[in-house]
Amino acid sequence: MPLTSYKTGFLNKHKEKIMNVPNHIAIILDGNGRWAKAKGMPRGYGHVKGCANLEKICYDIKDLGVKYLTVYAFSTENWRRSKDEVDGLMKLFRSYLKKCIKISRDNKMKIKIIGDISAFAPDIQESIWKLEEFSKDYDELYFQIAMNYGSRDEITRGMKKMAQDVADGKLSPEDVTEERISGYLDTAGVPDPDLMIRTSGELRLSNFLMWQMAYTEFYFTDVAWPDFNKAELVRAIEKYNQRDRRYGGVKEE
């Protein structure tokens, strides 16, 4: 993991601090709707502000030296929300995916959408393909956006592909390993998250990257996503630096 020097303005205005920056951060972007309602605004307003904040955080993430970022934007369960809210989110996705071209160019950022995109309208699918094609050769930041994503769905789809390969004689049961299973998932080739951040106070994973986060450090904050800024991001990374990651082993005294 890279060592990053940064100014801890909210801790000490006159000192710089060195910290280990996680290679891969995953974020559950939670609280947009509740944030808006608390301000007397419709839930859609919160989603718009949350989307704008995601644009800013991409720049902050790169500035801090993080190499991989995965965000939970729309789950397989989110289709159950009201038609008005879902329609508003689809409109927002259309706009954001186009804006991502500039964000990708500015950050030299490769973007991949994880999840089952076949459920989206053809124009959204086309925007996804164009964005992934445009950004495919960038390598300074890897950005995964989970859309129509659910970890159980991802694993189910992956295992269907694996079962078909076994049936076709391309794979034998003896070849099935943890690494092989990972290769059938949407995140194939991407290292597992080191740190997972969930905003807005909820204390659960909500079907997000359950295979990949076996040894991930979790950080929960009451701050809603639209208010989550670089200072909050640094605070999360500082907490991560206080963790003792043993991966099931025992630290020698």
Image (spheres, rainbow, N blue to C red):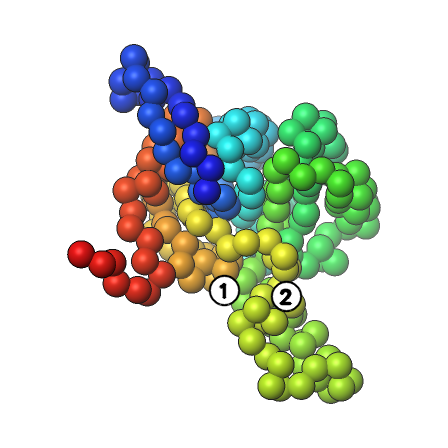
The answer to which of 217 and 36 lies nearer the viewer is: 217
Can you identify the residue that label 2 sits on?
A: 183
Front of the two marks 1 and 2: 2
Which residue is depicted at the point 70% across and 82% down? Answer: 171
At which x and y percent is residue 161?
70, 74
Q: Quadrant of the C terminus?
A: bottom left
Residue 111 image-quadrant placement:
top right
Q: Are marks 1 and 2 in contact (CB under 8 Å)?
A: no
At which x and y percent is residue 217?
37, 51
Is residue 214 visible in this depiction of the protein? yes
Is residue 222 visible in this depiction of the protein? no
Q: CA distance from mark 1 to mark 2?
A: 12 Å
Callout 2 amino acid: Gly
Residue at disc 2, secondary structure? helix
Residue 211 numbered mark, or none: 1
Is residue 96 left or right of 230 when viewed as pictured?
right
Residue at the front extreme, as displayed: 253
Residue at the top extreme, as displayed: 14
Which residue is depicted at the point 47% across and 62% down? Answer: 210
